[in-house]
Amino acid sequence: TGSAPENPTATVPDSLKPALGDNWELRVIYGPHGAPDFFTDDDMATFFSADWQVHYNSSRTGIRLVGPKPEWARSDGGEAGMHPSNIHDNAYAVGTVDFTGDMPVILGPDGPSLGGFVCPATVIAADRWKLGQLKAGDRIRFVPLSLDDADRLAAEQDACLADLSAPTLAPAPATVTTPILDRLDEQEDGPEVVYRAAGDRYLLVEYGPLELDLRLRFRAHALMLWLEEQKLDGILELTPGIRSLQVHFEPTVLPRRELLDTLKRAELTLDKQDDLEVPSRIVHLPLSWDDEACRLAIEKYTQSVRKDAPWCPSNIEFIRRINGLDSIDEVKKILFEASYVVMGLGDVYLGAPVATPYDPRHRLVTTKYNPARTWTAENSVGIGGSYLCVYGMEGPGGYQFVGRTMQMWNRFHRTEAFTQPWLLRFFDQIRFYEVSAEELQQIRRDFPKGRYPFRVEETTFNLGEYQRFLEQNDDAIRTFTDARNQAFDEELQRWVASGQINFESQQDLNAEEADSLPEGTPVESPTAGNIWKLTVAEGDRVEEGQVVAVLESMKMEIEVAAPEAGKVVHIARQEGQQINAGQAVMILG
């Protein structure tokens, strides 16, 4: 047979190896949201001139940034929430910079597909690789580019990877003007349409004013159906929001200008939506009210993210106050009487629904966490703005908790309820019934295996019928809404007066080790983070390998173990304090 030929050793030229340091430039496209609608011109100037620092609670989900707080162009987000960063939920592009309140987060490849926060910039496709190299404490400067330059850089990167050549393009920064690429004025048979750049691979189509109006959701649905019928080469994915549709596309196959012209032409062909009817189901879900998992998430948030948040320690009490209700029982009554219409799927993660009550008298308006939580239990149920969300999986989040329900996603089993991995569909109507925390635990064990009854009623959702319902109940709806808005405004003024409406994040990962640490064996932190829990106290004896502390970092809980047996002679960091990699949590003697 002879000897096998030797494989030549492949080497990567030094010229192709990127410099990996502590300071980074991320090239971005301005938008989809900017000045003057959401930010001030000064906000955007600051955004692009600031040195942002990577927060220790970062991961593939999102890279949190520490830096200056915006001034904001609005006082609040209206029905979308109390903070000016809050908007009616829309799809997110991978690499977009998402302001969760006053704190920006770069959404990574495992980030949410839908959410209700403004995004002033999106990392270009050619620079997304840098997101995986960022670590706690690194510094970032955002550099605006034109779409044409972003396309050229993406093409060059593909060519360089194909033949292992070095990139040569170095386009100059672009002037920051507007994230709006095109628009159509309001017509008799259609709302205003605004086309926004969401990076160099996504385009966001927005309908009408910044209001919760189901007619706008139907308009976005009609455009989605029209595009699906066209089967255009170059369209990769369509994701509807409350009043928008995000188009993920490949510009080398479908040029951006051609896509814009096609979208504008679609508006001229879409029929009036007055009597549009779509399939719907009434889906009954169990809810453990004020579940212990939700209370644990609030406790974690208070300790490691923000201690003075006005929605803590009880999100439900906050919901009562901001809606002007007399008791928590009244909050509970409204929630269990409401029928929530599913407006979007993938809010946060994995088929998670964003839904709003069919009857506006059931709309409990809140604000979203500022900044967002780092941890939320799977299938927690929360309210943000006028919307309810069921979290599809464990992860971060910003909605105000009311309880917990059963699974929205089932990857491993096909059952009567899960004919596909996700449970719900657009325009389903969710109705909750109460169960205890113990009952829910058993339901959560049984439901994914098809052992818990899933109660569903088939129906339809007709836009014309809904409009007639609103007209018939106009006076009662107006009375409820006026009282709710008054309570909302009063709470907002209390926030402004106390300074609680804003949050400026801080991080000190470069703090020096205390000079007076006693002699002994240090128990060092393996990474930058926050001391979530100490499991021992000074004077305790510990064994080698025993867990002595738990860090919160990179959106995980990381156990810190004793390197040897000994006695705890000194605690160097207390619960809630930040710590850097290599610094001592405690000293063993």
Image: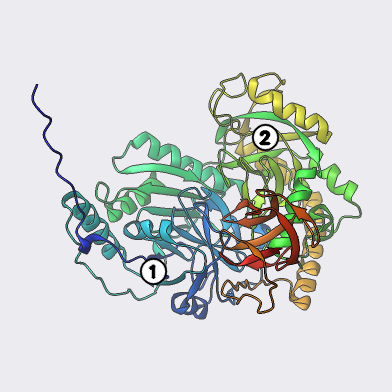
Can you tell which quarter of the image residue 444 is in?
top right
Q: Amino acid at mark 2?
A: Gln
User: What residue sits 69% from the left and 29% below the top?
Assistant: 283
Q: Which residue is mark 1?
A: 21
| Amino acid under disc 1 | Gly
Give the vertical position of 52 relative to 184 (above or below).
below
Residue 197 in sight here: no
Classify 511 as above or below 254.
Answer: below
* Viewer-nearest residue: 452 or 534: 534
- SS at circle 1: loop
Q: Which mark is residue 429?
A: 2
- Image spot of residue 160 (x, y percent): 20, 55
**Which image quadrant is residue 336 in?**
top right
- Mark 1 and mark 2 lie on one chain; the one further toward the N terminus is 1
The answer to which image quadrant residue 523 occupies is: bottom right
- How has the structure been colored for display? rainbow
Alpha-carbon span between mark 1 and mark 2: 50 Å
Counting from the top left corner in percent of width and height, residue 141 is at 42, 73
User: x, y (%) of residue 57?
Assistant: 58, 59
**Badges 1 and 2: C-beta atoms under 8 Å apart?**
no
Residue depicted at x 55% and y 39%: 350
Is 120 situated left or right of 333 in this image?
left
- SS at mark 2? strand
